[in-house]
Amino acid sequence: MDADEIAAGRARWQARYDAARKRDADFTTLSGMTVDPVYGPPEGVPYPGFERIGWPGEFPYTRGLYPTGYRGRTWTIRQFAGFGNAQQTNERYKMILGAGGGGLSVAFDMPTLMGRDSDDPQSLGEVGHCGVAVDSAADMEVLFGGIDLAGVTTSMTISGPAVPVFCMYLVAAERQGADLSTLDGTLQTDIFKEYIAQKEWLFDPEPHLRLIGDLMEYCAREIPRYKPLSVSGYHIREAGSTAAQELAYTLADGFGYVELGLSRGLDVNVFAPGLSFFFDSHVDFFEEIAKFRAARRIWARWLRDVYGATSEKAQWLRFHTQTAGVSLTAQQPVNNVVRTAVEALAAVLGGTNSLHTNALDETLALPTDESAEIALRTQQVLMEETGVVNVADPLGGSWYVEALTDKIEAEAEEIFARIRQLGGEGPHKIGPMTSGILRGIEDGWFTGHIAESAFVYQQALEKGDKRIVGVNCHTGTVAKDLEILRISHEVELEQRRVLAERKAGRDDAAVKAAVQRMVEVSRTGENMIPAMLDAVRAEATLGEICDALRAEWGVYREPARF
């Protein structure tokens, strides 16, 4: 790019920056030195390839979505939390919000993630252990009791039974008196990554895609600010993928959901802004920063050039980040505070829109109040003390970071081509990327490549080529064992007792009729969300709704592979 084009871009950026709202804050260094809101090539100097870097708030958004960076708005501190029953988790949410958290993120227990009630025999011993137990809309009311759902953004990390859980969230907000059309938040809903990595599915892919398509239509029409899909790379990375695989598989899944929306006749400029992303931030500092920058650039280009998006918001990749759970160690767990801080800083320098920082004890148990507070304060130290919010994309133009960004992007593009090849020449029921993803799931292509990457890394650890402090080097310590949070069996007994009371006190005939009506709608082309909402309002439980759909659609069984 020649010097005149660079100067024109800077002028465009300056006009947008001047017109944007900025926070009332001190944007100087600790010593009082004034810093510019963005930096670029020296005036009058050409920079080959600068169009791939560009300016913040301008296509291809390598340097961020907004001209102001974090001067306009800092990232949202969104701590992931959930344990025991709804009342216990509600108390943790109030602690997080009271301590400065900007949004909520719900962790559900395993029975809820699998669409089963707490009194299901398969739930025995799991209720409340890896998240909060939610059986019905009544639990959701307790979960958010005293928290204004119309005034706080809420993320829910659940995919298989995401749609009925979303309906419970809507009914809880409705019972608070909220105007549902104004709700803002994110539902994970990403079923592709379940088959690829996490394995918390209910049905075959096609029924799940039916529900997701209905949800996309409903939110675009009724709740325009709500994001019905958070396409998740986090679980793919936690399963052992490389950074480039995490990026490519996640964006490919996102392209699949774009194709799903288009196949429903939806306008990409209307529904694409409702897609958000969820990435892992691992401990290799610069690789993670490059991954985030490449993600924005790839998404913007594909949405514009492949899927025809013309609006800026439809081309934006907005993402939440969680620090890498898989990087935490049970040995010398206090070291996890350092790992989490480094990973959080990488997410911030990569331009994350919201962030969860893991607690030091999460490799051993759910976090205690104290460790949860340390995790929260980690973000606040970065935000308030380090000066990283003063300049947009401060590493932009670094030879190393730009080269790494280009390399990760190139690897991702190679993977996209292979996925599309898996789908064949067509015709494609939904789209070519979707066909490739479904074939890759069926053939074990994704899981095979992730397993191979995980194996290679494990070998490097065992040989000592890769090092983890406290595990295969610097193993001596004076640290004592941590006190960890333990979930009492009484939680499960009490949850089952309350559920039995609620079932006994409701109108069974109304519940059965509403669930049957939902099943009848599932046999038509009608949107299922209104019928499911009616079932939830009648206090149908999550297990009852999911069991009725299991009976209708069957249960997915992963093929055996050797």
Image (cartoon, rainbow, N blue to C red):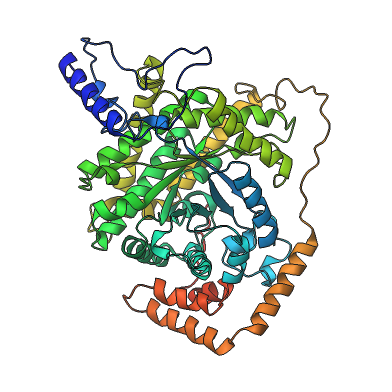
Image location (x, y in percent) of residue 399? 37, 15
Of all residues shown, which one is farthest toward the bottom?
Answer: 509
The residue under the point 45% across, 53% down is 186
**Residue 78 spot, x, y in % from top left:** 54, 44
Q: Can residue 88 be seen in this view?
A: yes
Q: In this view, does 383 lie to the left or right of 219?
A: right
In the rendered image, the vertical position of residue 530 relative to residue 295, given as above or below: below
Q: In which quarter of the image is the N terminus?
A: top left
Q: In this rendering, would 202 be left or right of 39?
A: right
- On screen, residue 11 versus residue 504, left or right, reads left
Residue farthest toward the front in the current orientation of the protein: 24
Vertical comparison of 21 with 435: above or below? above
Residue beneath the point at 50% across and 61% down = 160
Apparent side of residue 260 relative to residue 183 in the rendered image (left or right): left
Residue 548: percent from left, percent from top: 51, 77
Closest to the observer, 319 or 14: 14
Figure quadrant of residue 297: top left
- In the picture shown, does residue 181 fall above or below 509? above
Residue at x 61%, y 39% (from the top left corner)? 325
- What residue is drawn where x is 51% and y is 69%? 555
Q: Which of 424 and 434 is in front in this view?
A: 434
